[in-house]
Amino acid sequence: MPQTVVVGVDGSDESVRALRWAANQIREVGGIAHAIMVWHQPVQFGYRLPTPDSELEQRARNALDTAVKAVKADFPDVDVRPRLIRGHVVDEIVELSKQADLLVVGNKGHGAFTGMLVGSVALKLVHHAACPVVVVR
C-alpha cells in the first residue's frame, strides 16, 4: 500500500538525510514524500527581529528547494512534494501527521530562522505525532 510520508525539512544536513531516508522508503513501498518547511518570524526577548517576512519566507523557500533538489538528484522517480508553511513547527507538523502514514525528521537541525528540528523539537514530535515517527541520525 502506498504511503504518505511527511518529512520535516529545515535545510540542515540532518534534515536532508531525513528526506533522503524517506525517499528511499517511498522508492521501496510507493507513495509520496511531502517535504515540509515551517518558518516563522523569530522573537527575542518579546520583540520581533527586524528581518522582513518576505526575506524570511524566501530564505526558507531556498533552503527547501535546495534540499529537495539534492534528494531528487538521487531519487528522480520518487514523488517528493515541497511545501512551505508559516506557523509553529511542532503544531504544523503534528497537524500534518494526522493525514500521514509516517513522519520522518532529523535528530537535530537549524534553529536560526525556522526553529525547525532542534533536538527538543524532534522529541516533541515523537511524543505528539498522530502516526509513527522515524528520527534519522
Image: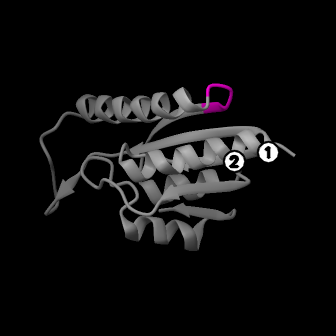
Residue on which disc 1 sits? 29
- Tally the marks: 2
Give the side of residue 126 with respect to residue 108, left or right.
right
* Residue 66 within the segment the image draws in magenta: no
Q: Is residue 131 above or below residue 76?
A: below
Counting from the top left corner in percent of width and height, residue 116 is at 38, 54
Residue drawn at (34%, 36%), measured in percent from left and top? 60
Q: Residues within 10 Å of mark 2 (few under 14, many from 20)?
A: some
Magenta highlight: main SS:
loop
Q: Which one is nearer the viewer's eye here, 101 or 69?
A: 69
Counting from the top left corner in percent of width and height, residue 108 is at 38, 61
- Residue type at tag 1: Val
* Residue 77 within the segment the image draws in magenta: yes
Determine the image quadrant of residue 47: bottom left
Counting from the top left corner in percent of width and height, residue 101 is at 74, 54
Q: Are marks 2 and 1 in contact (CB under 8 Å)?
A: yes
Q: Is residue 85 above or below residue 120?
A: above
Instruction: Find the magenta span and give its range.
Output: 76-80
- Residue type at tag 2: Gln
Q: Is residue 137 above or below residue 58?
A: below
Residue drawn at (14%, 47%), measured in percent from left and top? 49
Q: Which one is nearer the viewer's eye here, 75 or 92?
A: 75
Give the side of residue 73 with respect to residue 107, left or right.
right
Callout 2: SS: helix
Residue on which disc 2 sits? 25
Q: Residues within 10 Å of mark 1 (few under 14, many from 20)?
A: few
